Amino acid sequence: MILNGLRNDPRVGKIWQFPGGIREYEDRSGMLPNLASPHYDENVVPSEREARALLRSGSVHAIVATNRYFDLRPRAGRRFRDALQHLAKHAFPFSSHRHELGATFLLLWRREIREIPVAIVDCRDNNTIREEDVELLRLCKAYFKRELPFNRFNLFRPYAGRLPRSEMLSLLPKVHPIPLGIDDAQFEAWSRERASKTHDVFWSGRPNASQRLDLPVRLREIAARRGYRLDLGDGRVPHGEYRRRIAAARVCVSVEGAGWDCYRHCEAIALGAVPLINEPTVDAVAWADAPREILFRNDFSDFEGKLETLLSEEPLRNDVQRRLDALVRARLTWSVQARRVLDALLD
């Protein structure tokens, strides 16, 4: 997300990457030249020693880091290594600097980065800051978090008794919400795949949240009563098929899974299917201007009414789609997110 967005910002010159092989987003569609490009791994710093030397050289003016290292390239021993890291992170003490995963390398480089502003971007599903990441929050100038609770104190709930309230108050102003959003190029490319409608409603997803458990049964019952044409997927579907089926639907139900924010929220908009989303259970400020017609209560008390309105009033649905297109371009593209991160660093 951030790498693609930074490349589009005129304030950014050269981008160095450490470590190599990081992909925050897997381009399952194979449609994004900027992700599939052989230049994706340009300016990779090959070792920690060289990274430290680069930081001391004065050539780096800002650091943007994720606090999780996604290595999607299969390598020998990867599963064994990941298992050890998973066990190790629970063994390290609260103040440990040894949890060397992704941005936590910065904790070992305090001397080298004393004069360099740091931003952390946390796009994980959990809505708390993990104990091993608190030192990153202390270190950084700005901490952007995807799943951000309305009550900011809940970020520290798992270990609140071990963190002084005065320190919580000093750390909280650094925390900002950030949406998953969508790559600028992906949104434009998928918008060209919009198609004529053959179904009223599309839904496909794993039952990994309570709102999803009985959703297929609920949709079938509503469809039988109202005569809607449903397209229900069985779990994950191939990505090309996934795009075609969403583009062929008038409404795409997009219910939260492991976290409230979801790539499908924006993917449905790109493909021309109005997303019907449960109201945010986190502080989703980027969606604050979303049309109210697409948000239903988490107890589903107005779900059928919202669905009926979107399907029966085509002029309204078309207007909602236009407003959503504008919302994505103004608030949710990756270039917008990268600009916010840079603004926070350079302020």
Image (cartoon, rainbow, N blue to C red):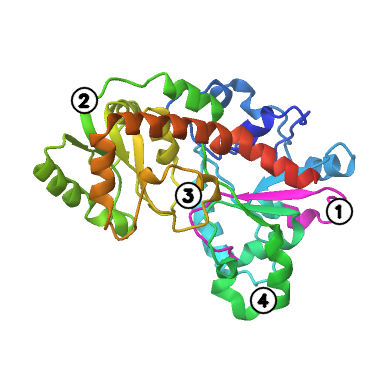
| Picture residue at 53% right of the left edge, 62% below the top | 149
**For the residues carrying marks 2 and 3, which lies nearer the camera in this image?**
2
Do the CB atoms of the residues marked 3 and 4 lie less than 8 Å apart?
no
Do the CB atoms of the residues marked 2 and 1 lie less than 8 Å apart?
no
Q: In the rendered image, which residue does mark 1 sit on?
A: 114
Q: In the rendered image, which residue does mark 3 sit on?
A: 79
Q: What element carries label 1?
A: loop
Judged left or right of residue 26, residue 16 is right
Instruction: Mark 3 or mark 4: name the one nearer the start of the chain.
Output: 3
**For the residues carrying marks 2 and 4, which lies nearer the camera in this image?**
2
Specify the amino acid type for callout 2.
Answer: Thr
Instruction: Mark 3 or mark 1: name the one nearer the start of the chain.
Output: 3
The quarter of the image holding the N terminus is: top right
Q: Residue 198 carries which label?
A: 2
Q: In the rendered image, which residue does mark 4 sit on?
A: 163
Residue 209 against residue 286 in the figure, above or below: below
Q: What stretch is highlighted in magenta?
A: 106-130
Q: Is mark 3 on a helix, strand or loop?
A: helix
Q: Report, in whole angstroms, how far the alpha carbon at label 2 lies from the one at label 4.
A: 55 Å
Q: Report, in whole angstroms, how far the alpha carbon at label 3 lies from the one at label 4.
A: 33 Å
Q: Report, in whole angstroms, how far the alpha carbon at label 3 lies from the one at label 1.
A: 35 Å
